[in-house]
Image (cartoon, rainbow, N blue to C red):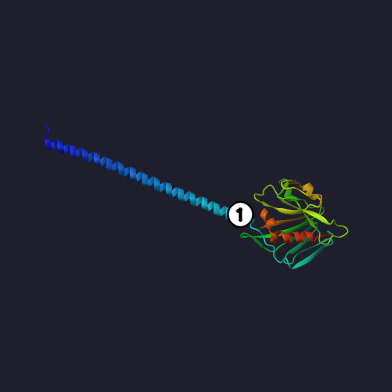
Amino acid sequence: MPTKKKKRLNRLSKIRKNHGWRALAITVLVAVLLLSGTYWFYNKHKDDNSKKAAAAYAAQEDNQQYTKIRITNVNTKKTYTSPNFGLSFTYPSDWIIKETSGKIIAESPDVYVGAITSQVVLTIRDKSQKLTEFDKGNATTVRDSVKIAYAHPTKNQRINTYLTYVKFPDARVGFDAIYVTGLDSYKKGEKVSSSDISKIDPVIKISFMKWGGPIEVLDSSLDDSNFIGPLKSIFESLTIN
């Protein structure tokens, strides 16, 4: 028969063992919770940082591609006359004009669309030139066409014409080009085909380029007089001889 002292010692031993297991279990649980919390916090923080980085990158990309363009030297102009096309137009004096067989290209100096160096490009093409910008499909108008009046129309020229703002199938949020569409007016969201544009002779458009490739400009740029005013002025100055 165990003595009272031994019984007491056995009970104390069991209590210590139980207390030890409980302490160990609590320690393990606390450690697991701490590790889980640390893992959750780290991953949430990492995920938040990733989202912020992605958003910052997207914003930067959008700023680079879609920030409004400012046209320079709008008050200092030159006039270009083409005997091949039988037309003239005025343009900012710091633009460069190149004429080849069947095509006139007028390029602005470097302007900045966000951090990207770009050009505004006026292109005048005769019917022999392919409209390669329509290779991927029809364009879509981003706004209703706008009627403008020619500043000095000749007897061989209509008094008014429409300008039509379009985007091509690859466009995301901006528009790609402004076309002279003659007497043809379009509503926002209408399709414009290459055959529609080729009815106008010559084909006249303004587009936007970087590194030799096209870029989009924000639709809201059309509400900015510093942007659209000088471009309309070029179109309005056209005279047909």
* Callout 1: SS: helix
- Residue 215 seen by the camera: no
What quarter of the picture does the N terminus occupy? top left
- Give residue 218's position: percent from left, percent from top: 66, 54
Task: Please give the name of the residue rendered at 79% of the width and 65% of the height, measured from the top-left corner.
Answer: 79
The residue most toward the bottom is 76
In the image: residue 33, left or right of residue 129: left
- Residue 33 seen by the camera: yes
Which residue type carries mark 1? Answer: Asp
In the image: residue 155, left or right of residue 99: right
- Give residue 49's position: percent from left, percent from top: 49, 52
Task: Please give the name of the residue rendered at 76% of the width and 67% of the height, measured from the top-left corner.
Answer: 77
What quarter of the picture does the C terminus occupy? bottom right
Q: Is 163 in front, or is 51?
A: 163
Packing grade of label 1 (10 A; few <14, some 14-19, many >=20) is some
- Give residue 130's position: percent from left, percent from top: 77, 51
In the image: residue 33, left or right of residue 107: left
Q: Which residue, given by chain and number where applicable, does mark 1 sit on? A: 62
Total number of numbered labels? 1
29 versus 154 height, above or below: above
Please identify the quarter of the rendering in which residue 104 is found.
bottom right
The residue most toward the top is 1
- Give residue 140's position: percent from left, percent from top: 72, 47
